Amino acid sequence: MGLSNFLLSDYRELMTYSDQVKKYGLTKMAPLIITCSITGGQHGKEANPNLPETPQEQAQSTYDAYNAGASLVHIHRRQPENPALDSKKAEEYLEVNRLVREKCPEIIINNTCIGGRLIDTENMTTSELLHASTAAKPEVASIDITSTSQRMHLGARTKEMGGERDAYLKHFDLINNDEDIVELLKEFDQYDIKPEWEMDNLTDIKRLRGIIDKGVVKGPHWCMMLFGGNGVFPNYQAMALAMQMLPPDTIFSTINIGGAHNAMMTQSIIMGNHVRVGLEDVTYYAPHQLVTSNAQLVERAVRIAKELGRPVATPAQAREMLGLGAPRQY
């Protein structure tokens, strides 16, 4: 039975109820898409030595998360000369995309793309549009539709971590405007990349609706919202309100960070949304217990989903839901 028919049909059709439960779980919700954000662009091994930074580490970590149940991987490529920083070179993103595809033939590859203008507040300069990863042709790329100002304490690094650095306070501003986003979407069309809209607050939904109304992007719209940390206050009322505000033809996933990670992830699964996990978002598995791998976080999400009767999406099912074609080769 096709996924669209499954979502619209009745349990009494095609199968007995017991057969449906065996195949799809106890709920009638869409299979759960688990995204694994393996690295991130801020903290690194100084926060957790198990965080993958080199292309080889990222490919292996993705492979383990893929086998654990992740259907989509979100990649920040680090600079080879300084893995404490994000790469701005398409060929470096392409390298890690190739390694990931070799190990994971079906997983959906998502590169970070930010899509705004980062302001160097110390030198008062504006960077170029951060869309270096688009030429590497990921299947999906994230666009931060928010505007934000953040201050983050980053720990010291030793040479053994792949780069020496004293601890410091990182302060950056992300400025977004609709014109920049529309221009970036033209590049997405050129490379056949699906946007992943990342939002930090509820007002970002209004901005997204405005961009969709311009007719420059087609659905289904793959949207993520950050709960906790610098994002939306982590409670179920805020999540429910966000769901009510989302544009039509939206597939909604949550990014849950900080102490409320498990509670909000579970709430998202219960409410029929999708979830992102990974060492970008949390470095501790439990109080005083570091995450041992990205796969460990995926395994927990899979276990919770199964205990709640929610089926976990295969990469093929995730592709069908997101409107993606066959796995892209590199």
Image (cartoon, rainbow, N blue to C red):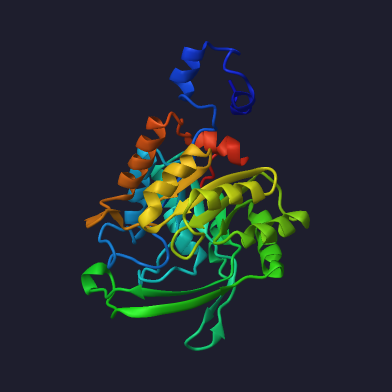
Q: Nearer the viewer, residue 320 or 288?
A: 288
On screen, residue 323 above or below 87: above
Report the residue at 53% width, 47% height from top.
253
For the N terminus, the image quarter is top right
Point out residue 99 in the picture as x, y percentages from the top left corner. Answer: 40, 51
Report the residue at 35% width, 75% height from top.
153
Point out residue 83 in the picture as x, y percentages from the top left corner. Answer: 35, 69
Location of residue 248 (image quadrant)? top right
On screen, residue 85 above or below 4: below
Point out residue 233 in the picture as x, y percentages from the top left corner. Answer: 49, 59
Instruction: Tell me if I can see residue 325 in this picture.
Output: no
**On the rendered structure, is 189 left or right of 292?**
right
Badge count: 0
Residue found farthest to the right: 214
Point out residue 73 in the picture as x, y percentages from the top left corner. Answer: 45, 49
Q: Nearer the viewer, residue 123 or 16?
A: 16
Report the residue at 27% width, 61% height from top.
48
**On the rendered structure, is 248 left or right of 165?**
right
